[in-house]
Amino acid sequence: MNATASASVTSPRELHQPATGAGRLLKQEAATTVEVVGSGEDAIVRKTYHNQGVRLLQTFGRRSRAAREFANLRAIEQIGVPCTEALWWSERRRVGFVVESTLATRFLPGSRPLKDVLATLGREAHRSRAALAKAMGELVADLHRGGFLWCTPMPRNVLVLGDPEQARLAVCDTPAGADLGRSLHGTTLACIDLFDAAFSPSRAADFSRVERLRWLRSYCAGDRAQMRSLWQKIAHRRVLHHDLRRGLAMLWHTYILSALRHRRNRRVKPTSPA
């Protein structure tokens, strides 16, 4: 659906708007376009979410994906977990529906999605893969201790910065997440992220059984009792049951509580860039 003259346009939610114009295409899908705009230290990643059909109807009365992701990345940055730097966001609405929204983040040269790195390394690169599994377990643990539920912690949403052996990771895709404001580390709610990150059937393509256990040991900081407890909760979880749990958690924490908290804490009206 194309926007008409009746559509409202929201200016970028920051004091300045970095490089604009045509960019180098990284990914083009029906619902998402990702581009790199500019060069050098001024380069940004511009991610545009397109909403059509049922996806458009689902946006009524909700914050846009770009707005949620901007807020989530800022929250993750505040709790000290490495992530892409959120710069600004904008949206285009029609009669309460979000037709399109855009998020700009700082471009990280030399970074690659963890899923691509694991596929390139192959199963024989035991040392690098072990380091990456350990680092990702620690990354998710730090998020949970800081009160953040990710909801989409798959390897494709984690960036590897530089040499894989150094295992430096950063969070990069967070529109489904929610800042709970309290630790959820090791809880039943945390199992939503643990299952999607390392223990769902589809993760077998990314991590071996040994690497999954290393991942969980890292998440638990070596606490064997906690490892056993969490393993019992996630080892036999069925995908459909899990998807239902995650959907309900997102409905409550992402779309209801976070939206209410956002409205309550909003103090400054958006301003247009100079």
Image (cartoon, grey):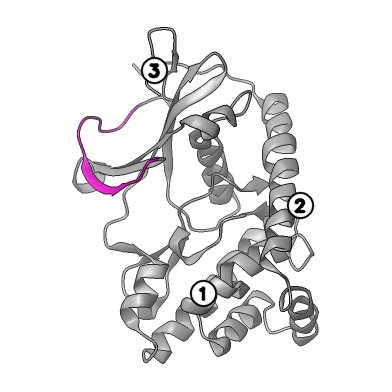
Q: Is residue 238 in view?
A: yes
Whole-percent x, y for residue 212 in the image: 58, 82
CA gap between label 2 and label 1 equals 22 Å
Q: Please, which residue is most extreme toward the front here?
A: 53
Residue named by callout 1? 135
Asked if disc 3 and disc 1 are in contact, CB closer than 8 Å, the reply is no
Q: Which mark is residue 5?
A: none
Query: Is residue 86 a member of the stretch shown in magenta?
Result: no
Whole-percent x, y for residue 11 in the image: 42, 19
Whichever of labels 2 and 1 marks the residue nearer the N terminus, that label is 1
Residue named by callout 3? 3
Whichever of labels 2 and 3 marks the residue nearer the N terminus, that label is 3
Whichever of labels 3 and 1 marks the residue nearer the N terminus, that label is 3
Residue named by callout 2? 182
Q: At 73% from the left edge and 35% from the top edge, which residue is drawn?
A: 256
Which residues are the magenta region? 17-30
Q: Secondary structure at mark 1?
A: helix
Q: Badge 3, how many Cα within 10 Å: few under 14, some, many 20+? A: few
The mark closer to the camera, 2 or 3, is 3
Please state which of residues 133 and 81 is positioned toward the viewer in this rendering: 133
Q: Please, which residue is most extreme toward the top here?
A: 6
Position of residue 46 relative to residue 82, above or below, is above
Asked if disc 2 and disc 1 are in contact, CB closer than 8 Å, the reply is no
**Relative to residue 61, is residue 234 drawn left or right?**
right
